[in-house]
Amino acid sequence: MTWVAGLTVTGKMTCDGCGRVMRHSERYGYICEEGKPPLCLCVDCSRARGYLKLKRDEKGKEVETFL
Ligand SMILES: [Zn+2]
């Protein structure tokens, strides 16, 4: 079972996917897979791995959301 949360960086964090340093207030994905250590992925890595999906909000505007 995989559990994904969309969170916001406080301070500085390093992406576990590409090693990039994410800055304060950037969004990142916190991915918990059963039996594996949790991963913090930047938006680009989350998108590349399919954890970020494009959806339409109630006004028809496209927004990216974490699963
Ligand atoms: Zn990354």
Image: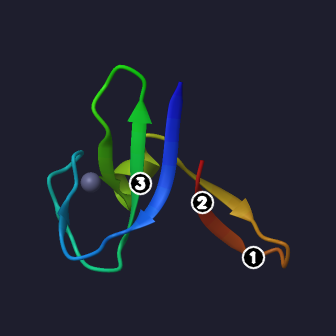
Which is nearer the eye, 7 or 63? 7
Crowding near pointer 3: few (<14 within 10 Å), some, many (20+)? many
Does the numbered disc 3 mark a residue whose Cβ is under 8 Å from ligand 1?
no
Q: CA distance from mark 3 to mark 1?
A: 21 Å
SS at badge 1: loop
Near mark 2 (Cα within 10 A), the count class, few <14, some 14-19 or many ≥20, is some
Mark 2 and mark 1: Cα distance apart in space = 12 Å
Horizontal and vertical percent for residue 41? 32, 51
Please give the name of the residue rendered at 82% of the width and 74% of the height, measured from the top-left corner: 60
Closer to viewer: mark 3 or mark 1: 3
- Give the amino acid type for the residue marked by disc 2 in the picture: Thr
Query: Which residue in the protein does label 1 denote?
Result: 61
Q: Nearer the viewer, mark 2 or mark 1?
A: 2
Q: Is mark 2 within 8 Å of ligand 1?
A: no
Residue 29 in the image: above or below residue 33: below
Quadrant in which residue 36 is drawn = top left
> Secondary structure under badge 3?
strand
Q: Earlier in the sequence, mark 3 or mark 1?
A: 3
Q: Is residue 37 left or right of residue 49?
A: left
The residue pinned by badge 2 equals 65
Say which amino acid is labelled 1: Lys
Horizontal relation, residue 42 to residue 58: left or right: left
Q: Which residue is mark 3?
A: 29
Disc 3 versus disc 2: distance between alpha carbons? 10 Å
Dot 2 falls on a residue whose secondary structure is strand
Q: Residue at x 24, y 45 (%)?
A: 17
Going from the N terminus, do you reach mark 3 or mark 2 first?
3
Where residue 8 appears, as percent x and y from the top left, is: 40, 70
